[in-house]
Image: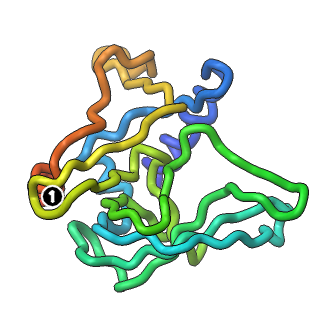
Amino acid sequence: MRRTVLVLTALLGLLLAAPAGATSVVELELTAHIAESTAVVEATVGTPYVTINDANGHPLTHTPLHVTSVLAGSAPAKIEVTQHKGTVGDRTLSMTGDGLLEPGSSVVVFVVQAEGRWWLTALAQSVWTVDGAGASATATRDLGGLVFFERDPETGAIVPSHEPVANRTTLGALRAAVTAAKGN
């Protein structure tokens, strides 16, 4: 939990440095991504619906996920991922770099349960869309709208990332990486 607060604090500071139309984030290595998540699941995306947040009047989109496999952590057979976005009447809310959950698609998602709801752990970093079937199926992340930063190992400062962020693999390799990383 403390790490989540630190990451969120760093992200807030980085938002000021983001180019227009982008969200600044610290890339989560797989082990950290799993540690920050309640579960990593394979699922089929259902049809989303939008409600209004009683606390602030902003739209919330709730997307049902029909879980086919739990790769790490624990989750029931059906969860609803809540995101701060949507349109209700003349009110629209969106966040650049948020994860895309297309109805009917197969996905691997990293989710955290908090405030009685399921949320994506780290925006678009947490959504791998699966195209095809079996271990050789392609798994990709749409990271458009995200600007990545990393922690300098020597100084601890958060600096722009110069390494490309992995956004394509196979479902079999992703499953194996999650299995290997959750053991650490």
Coloring basis for residues: rainbow
Packing grade of label 1 (10 A; few <14, some 14-19, many >=20) is some
Residue found at the far bottom of this picture: 77
**Quarter holding residue 143:** top left
Q: Please say if 152 is above or below 178.
A: above
**Amino acid at pointer 1:** Arg
> Which is more toward the observer, 136 or 51?
136
Q: Is residue 74 left or right of residue 52?
A: left
Residue 65 appears in view? yes
Residue 181 appears in view? no
Instruction: State the residue at coordinates (58%, 32%).
Output: 23
> Which is more toward the observer, 24 or 78?
78
SS for callout 1: helix
Instruction: State the residue at coordinates (33%, 77%).
Output: 67
**Quarter holding residue 95:** top right
Q: Is residue 168 left or right of residue 88?
A: left
Instruction: State the residue at coordinates (10%, 53%).
Output: 136
Instruction: State the residue at coordinates (10%, 58%).
Output: 135
Q: Is residue 88 left or right of residue 5?
A: right
**Quarter holding residue 16:** top right
- Which residue matches tag 1? 175
Q: Please say if 143 is above or below 128.
A: above
Residue 15 spot, x, y in % from top left: 63, 29
Residue 71 spot, x, y in % from top left: 21, 67
Total numbered labels placed on residues in the image: 1
Residue 52 spot, x, y in % from top left: 79, 69
Q: Please say if 100 is above or below 97.
A: below
Q: Is residue 66 left or right of residue 102?
A: left
Residue 29 spot, x, y in % from top left: 28, 40
